[in-house]
Amino acid sequence: MDLNYLFYRQQISLLRARSAANPESRAAHEGLAKGYTEQILAYRNTNHRLETAEREVA
């Protein structure tokens, strides 16, 4: 997974939400940004668990 891509898409979604012409469009873009945020956090949590496990083995 490419975190840079997820951060990029998250920021684009937030910018589009900010400039949305109507509430429905704003909500859609905010939803996309939330989804990207969840993917980023899941990736970070997975890597944190792996790093912790590697330290315990060492």
Image: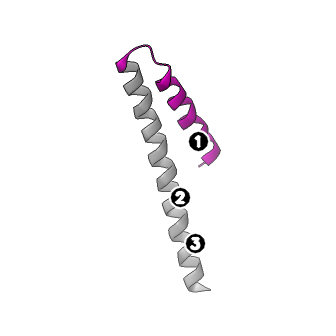
Q: Which residue is mark 2?
A: 44
Look at the numbered disc 3 and give the secondary structure of its residue: helix
> Can you identify the residue that label 3 sits on?
51
Residue 11 is one of the magenta-drawn residues? yes
Say which mark, if any, is on residue 7.
1
Q: From the viewer's perspective, tell me whether residue 27 is left or right of residue 51.
A: left
Instruction: Look at the image and give the residue range highlighted in magenta.
Output: 1-23
Image x and y of residue 26, in percent: 41, 23
Q: Furthest residue to the front?
A: 18
The image shows residue 9 at horizontal and vertical percentages of: 56, 35
Which residue reaches farthest top? 21
> Can residue 35 be spotted in the picture?
yes
Q: Amino acid at mark 1?
A: Phe
x and y percentages locating residue 24 in the rendered image: 35, 20
Which numbered disc, 1 or 2, marks the residue that appears first in the sequence?
A: 1
Amino acid type, callout 3: Glu
Is 32 located above or below residue 58 in the figure?
above
Q: In terms of sequence position, does the residue under pointer 2 or pointer 3 come before the other?
A: 2
Q: Is 1 above or below relative to 45? A: above
